[in-house]
Amino acid sequence: MSLFQLHPIRHHAHRASALAAALACALPLSAQATNGYFAHGYGAQSLGVAGVAIALPQDTLVIASNPAGISALGSRLDAGLTLFAPRREADIQGSPVPGLNGQYDGNGRKNFWIPEFGYTRQLDNQLSLGVAVYGNGGMNTRYERNPYGAIGGQGRAGVNLEQVFISPAVAYKLTPQHSLGAALNIVHERFSAEGLQGFDQSGYSASPGNVTNRGTDTSNGVGLRMGWLGEITPELKVGFSWASSVRGRFDKYKGLFADQGNFDIPANYGLGLSYQLTPRWQLAADYQVIQYSGVKPVANPIGNFLTGAKLGDDAGPGFGWKDIDVIKLGATHRYSDALTLRAGYSHAAQAIPRDQTFFNVLAPGVVQDHVSLGFTWKTSAQGEWTGYATHAFSKTVSGQNSIPANLLGGGEANIRMKENVLGVAYGWRF
């Protein structure tokens, strides 16, 4: 029997999910997409080094990467705001369907504001508690010209997926050099889709009427993140982090998502290193794996149509995403006692294969390379301001056998995306 099958745990998980939903209603949720539909980092100081954090705890949002890291922070509070500006485009060519070919702009909404908050309290030399509130990721497109209009889509088309995490955490120092940490991932999600009427029929969906234009549906779930942070030598630190999947379900869209509307947040894990090269220079790196293949609506390929499966079936067609590996590299330089400078680069594998681009016009999370710059300016012994900027380079995935010839006559869908991100946060040490 698993931990989450125990009745008392289920009861508390339900209450925690309800709390997440209540708090999420007070937050301006925003959609973002970087490494697939995961954020590429959490916390302004980590984002200044392209998301490196597993063995490099800098602010309280390290809870989202490795909860063991709060054992190195003492007592502090962080609050930040990020401006996320993605650009999403698609084009379809070579289709024999009249009106399907053409250029499509998915930027009906261009800018998103993403808040974050974290707090830690060191209770004694061994035990620390904390909580982080942040957006894990998401996806948004809004096409005023519907890419699926020629096959029955009506009005504008697009999707909106938003996720907010509330993560209470605890860390315990086993020895002065080694800490273990754990956090609950209490998650509230929202999803909506529009303009997909061409697929909202019995020939394509197992649940017609539950494919598109059903308004916003919500889902609450609870998962677990665990981590370790160890000091191998005074200069070298190593960390490991693992997060379970989080169950999600959108009943209003059970005719769109495989497995009758289930839409879990995938499990992920990572390994980190940091090295104090000199008293003023520190280098760090993370390796992360996001297991999109464990989520049927995300992982099932569009080709499942050809096996007789329909949207919403257990084996129903989906977006065809693969697991991805992410490598993040960063450097920090303590320029003076007041000013710290940061720079970082990250590279992710491509989640979307070339033969899966047709559905992914709705979710073109194809960017792979990010560069970041950041700084922290100490204004007093307790207070500090942090800022960062990130650019995700434009990436195009050109379709190859991407529109099923047996269903829609063939042709290719090409999708592209780029992003700019700016953020600022204030931190206060107690």
Image (cartoon, rainbow, N blue to C red):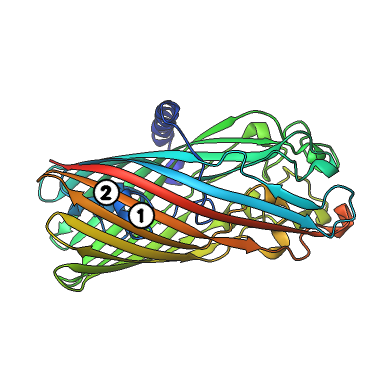
Instruction: Tell me, yes or no, whether the two marked residues, 1 and 2, touch with CB atoms within 8 Å.
Output: no
- The amino acid type, in three-letter code, at marker 2 is Thr
Give the vertical position of 52 relative to 382 (above or below): below
Near-viewer residue (185 or 330):
330
Residue at 36%, 64% (x, y): give it. Answer: 344
Ranked by sequence position, the earlier of labels 1 and 2 is 1
**Mark 1 neighbour density, 10 Å: few (under 14) some (14–19) many (20 or more):** many
- Callout 2 secondary element: strand
Is residue 306 found left or right of 161 in the rendered image?
right
Is residue 417 found left or right of 116 in the rendered image?
right
Q: Position of residue 155 (x, y in %)?
A: 75, 33
- The amino acid type, in three-letter code, at marker 1 is Leu
Whether residue 310 is visible to the viewer of this picture, yes or no, is: yes
Q: Name the image quarter holding residue 412.
A: bottom right
Give the vertical position of 1 relative to 280 (above or below): above
Near-viewer residue (268 or 137):
137
Q: Position of residue 152 (x, y in %)?
A: 84, 39
Whether residue 322 is visible to the viewer of this picture, yes or no, is: no
Give the vertical position of 72 relative to 254 (above or below): below
Q: CA distance from mark 1 to mark 2?
A: 10 Å
Residue at 68%, 46% (x, y): give it. Answer: 258
> Which-is-in-front pick, marks 1 and 2?
2
Q: Position of residue 45 (x, y in %)?
A: 29, 53
Q: Position of residue 267 (x, y in %)?
A: 48, 54
Residue at 18%, 71% (x, y): give it. Answer: 235
Can you tell which mark lies on residue 397?
A: none
- Callout 1 secondary element: helix
Residue position marked by numbered label 2 in the rendering: 386
Quadrant position of the C terminus in the picture = top left
Can you tell which mark lies on residue 47?
A: 1
Near-viewer residue (273 or 98):
98
